[in-house]
Amino acid sequence: MSPFAVPAIVFITVVTVVIGAFGYKISRNTSDFLVASRTVSPGANASAISGEYLSAASFLGVAGLIMVNGVDMLWYPVGFTAGYLAMLLYVAAPLRRSGAYTLPDFAEARLRSTGVRGLATGFVVLIGWLYLVPQLQGAGLTLTTVTGAPSWVGAVVVGAVVTLNVAVGGMRSITFVQAFQYWVKLTAIAFPAMVLLAVWYHRDGAPSPAQQPLLDDGNRWLVPLTELGDHPLFIVYSLILATFLGTMGLPHVLVRFYTNPDGRAARTTTLVVLGLLGIFYLFPTVYGALGRVYAPELLQKGNADAVVLVLPDAALGGLPGQLLGGLVAAGAFAAFLSTASGLMVSVSGVLSTDVFGRLSGGHGSVRDFRRSAMVAGVVPLLLALQAGSLGLSTVVGLAFAVAASTFCPLLVLGIWWRGLTPVGAAAGLIIGGGLSGLAVLITVLGPALSGWPGALLAEPAAWSVPTSFAVMVLGSLASRKRVPADVGRTMVQLHAPERLRLGQ
């Protein structure tokens, strides 16, 4: 592997700590730690959201899936990006206008129910930790691939650095970190991809003989719906539903919209995010396709997630391959650091306000936030060290399914339907979250299943999301008398532009 990989990783880690230290100097109160005092501009926030959203699954996992399963896996990046369109249309601006600090804040403000708030807190923590585990495992995979070090070393390094940054600077600190790391990741994946494409297409002044195997039908690149199990069409549609709707239910993404100054800025932020993600996702496909040509041994080893790290040296060799390999390793580590930072802030925020704050008799202080950050970092690290090797995109896809089955119905119905009641919301969260969570546990920890049982559990969104929506609606209709008395005022707050409400 590249001798430049370790210096590049060390450089990214040091820069992350330095930027985090800068955030520490200007983070003074609880609002700074939770929502950066709502002062982040759309451009900076879009870069930060893109930085935290492009996780291990995006940087490594998508390329690995495409390498193994071909073009069918393009639905992952399509769904990951298209989810922001749904967020732009239905959630971004009203959520910011709610004035909430966290998702549980929104749930209580909309439904006037501490019970629903408690359920929301539990699912924020569950989804955050489920998403954090593959980030830490991806860090271990990266360090093992480039140095041969034990996989736990990378997980511990990322866990320690992120916990430190979040604890000392909170949201204000990681905003700077994530915005910087998006551009690092884009450079680290785009520049090597363009060089590798040029090498593949035209080596030594003549068309490369590697072109034909890549484009050959025998590699299944032109055959749809292969290698997806016994019911591929169901799996594809369920995957699309999970990624498209799951985005608007991811706590670490939603909390960033609270940092915008107003609803209009939140919408602008979402629009810019669509562009930034669309550019990035052009490139993992290149690595997955070329991996079949230059690194086919990864398929036999069952280590396709490493294709982005291995490909530069395998295709180029020598100093150019080593330099590009170091750049890619730096980008991969930036992916783990930025996504883990966002997840840890979202989990720390709800733990500080709903657990440690309640225990101390308040509503969450800077001290409570820092204590929460320690818990939010240690638990998933222990899980990552104990869990076996998991496909990065597979586990993240399951986290999307849980988010789509819980917070997506809560937000869509809570924002757009006056009739949602605490009873209906609680029932939908319990049923949708319980069913999708059970599917995740069986898929990750249980025996491999085939036929319809295997398909339904591997991609549960197609049935768990409609079930959650239906339960929330039916539960609310059965408890009409429990609609909050001030729902009209809440709806005005969510939907009326700030200038209109302030009489400007």
Image: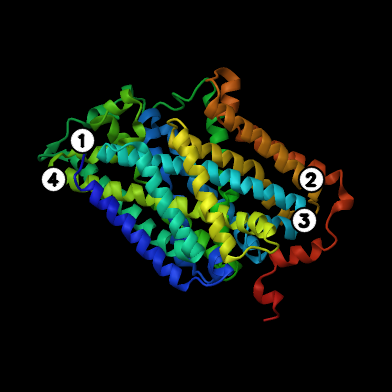
On residue 158, the disc is none
Measure the C-alpha gap from mark 2 to mark 4. 61 Å
Measure the C-alpha gap from mark 3 to mark 1. 56 Å
| Amino acid identity at mark 4 | Leu
Measure the C-alpha gap from mark 1 to mark 2. 55 Å
Which mark is first along the chain, 3 or 4? 3
Measure the C-alpha gap from mark 2 to mark 3. 10 Å
Q: Quadrant of residue 426?
A: top right
| Amino acid identity at mark 1 | Ala
Q: Quadrant of residue 183?
A: bottom left
User: Can residue 272 be seen here?
Assistant: no
Q: Residue at x 23, y 41 (%)?
A: 312
Labelled pair 2, 4 in contact (Cβ < 8 Å): no
Residue 20 location (% of width, % of height):
41, 63
* Residue under label 1: 314
Q: Residue at x 78, y 44 (%)?
A: 473
Q: Is residue 376 left or right of residue 275?
A: right
Measure the C-alpha gap from mark 4 to mark 3. 60 Å
Residue 37 location (% of width, % of height):
56, 71
* Residue under label 4: 319
User: Can residue 424 be seen here?
Assistant: yes
Residue 395 location (% of width, % of height):
50, 36
* Residue under label 2: 424
